[in-house]
Image: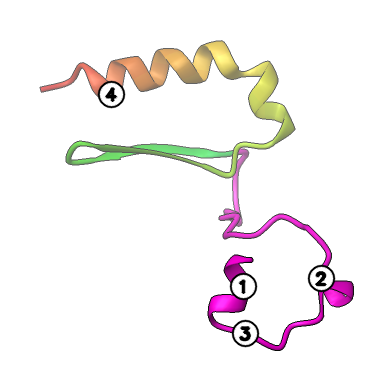
């Protein structure tokens, strides 16, 4: 339904549900965690991030509680 607002002639048979959006990738290292002002960015975290999730959480808490 939503797509018809900007593409009225779309044929439903040509549509396939899928994921959309940007997946940032970093060229080096496993992942990147940094703070800019009040924003904490976690980039490049994939399956190794599951194993590292507790350590990542500790880093995020440390960054979030910094003045």
* Discs 1, 4 touching: Cβ within 8 Å: no
Residue assigned mark 4: 63
Q: Nearer the viewer, mark 1 or mark 4?
A: 1
Tag 4's secondary structure? helix
Q: Nearer the viewer, mark 4 or mark 3?
A: 3
Mark identifier at residue 7? 3
Counting residues from the start of the chain, the first of labels 4 and 3 encountered is 3
Mark identifier at residue 3? 1
Residue assigned mark 2: 15
Label 3: how many Cα within 10 Å (few below 14, some 14–19, many 20+): few
Compared with residue 30, is residue 52 higher up or lower down, i.e. above or below?
above
Q: Main secondary structure of the magenta part?
A: loop
Tag 3's secondary structure? loop
Q: Nearer the viewer, residue 6 or 31?
A: 6
Quadrant for the N terminus in the image? bottom right
> Marks 2 and 4, Cα distance to the nearest angstrom?
43 Å
Q: Does 8 lie within the magenta span?
A: yes
Compared with residue 26, is residue 64 higher up or lower down, i.e. above or below?
above
Residue 4 placed where, x, y %?
A: 62, 77
Counting residues from the start of the chain, the first of labels 2 and 3 encountered is 3
* Discs 3, 1 touching: Cβ within 8 Å: yes
> Marks 3 and 1, Cα distance to the nearest angstrom?
6 Å
Tag 1's secondary structure? helix
């Amino acid at each position: 339904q939503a797509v018809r607002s900007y593409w009225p002639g779309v044929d439903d048979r040509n549509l396939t549900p899928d994921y959309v959006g940007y997946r940032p990738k970093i060229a080096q290292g496993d992942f990147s965690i940094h703070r800019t002002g009040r924003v904490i960015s976690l980039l490049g975290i994939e399956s190794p991030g599951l194993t590292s999730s507790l350590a990542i959480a500790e880093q995020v808490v440390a960054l979030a509680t910094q003045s």
